[in-house]
Amino acid sequence: MRFLKLLFHSHGHEGDQSLLKTMTFAITHFTVAFSVAYVLTGDIILGSLIAMVEPAINTVAYFFHEKLWARRARQRQHTRNRMTATTA
């Protein structure tokens, strides 16, 4: 349950935008992967297969990458807030 909360907590208009960014990244990545694979192979089926596998894995990796960066930013902000509170 905690894992699901980590993934989907605060996704919304004013919250964490990593899920939306992941979806737009996926669309862009699939389009680029298909275009490159099709140009290199000349085969629409092979281009489609390549465009399904690699970007799907990369999109999941990107989502977790975004989550880690968001956590890092929160930790830095927390540290700054504590430093400000102790010096004030």
Image (cartoon, rainbow, N blue to C red):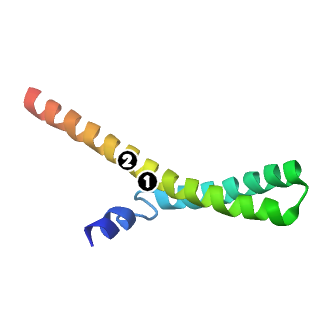
Q: Residues within 10 Å of mark 1 (few under 14, many from 20)?
A: some
In the rendered image, the residue lying farthest to the bottom is 1
Task: Tell me the number on the disc at residue 68.
Answer: 2
Residue at position x 87%, y 53% in the image = 41
Left or right of residue 32, residue 65 in this image: left
Does residue 67 appear in the picture of this structure?
yes
In the rendered image, the residue lying farthest to the right is 42
Where's residue 83, x and y in %?
Answer: 15, 30
Does residue 88 appear in the picture of this structure?
no
SS under mark 2: helix
Residue at position x 32%, y 41% in the image = 72
In depth, the one of 39 and 82 nearer the eye is 39
Q: CA distance from mark 1 to mark 2?
A: 6 Å
SS under mark 1: helix
Where's residue 32, x and y in %?
Answer: 75, 51
Q: Are the residues at dot 1 and dot 2 in contact (C-beta closer than 8 Å)?
A: yes
Q: Residue 47 falls in which quadrant of the image?
A: bottom right
The amino acid type found where label 2 is placed reads Leu
Residue at position x 8%, y 31% in the image = 86
Residue at position x 67%, y 60% in the image = 27
Specify the quadrant that holds the C terminus: top left
* 39 vs 6: above or below: above
Q: Which residue is mark 1?
A: 64
The amino acid type found where label 1 is placed reads Phe
Where's residue 71, x and y in %?
Answer: 32, 47
* 69 vs 21: above or below: above
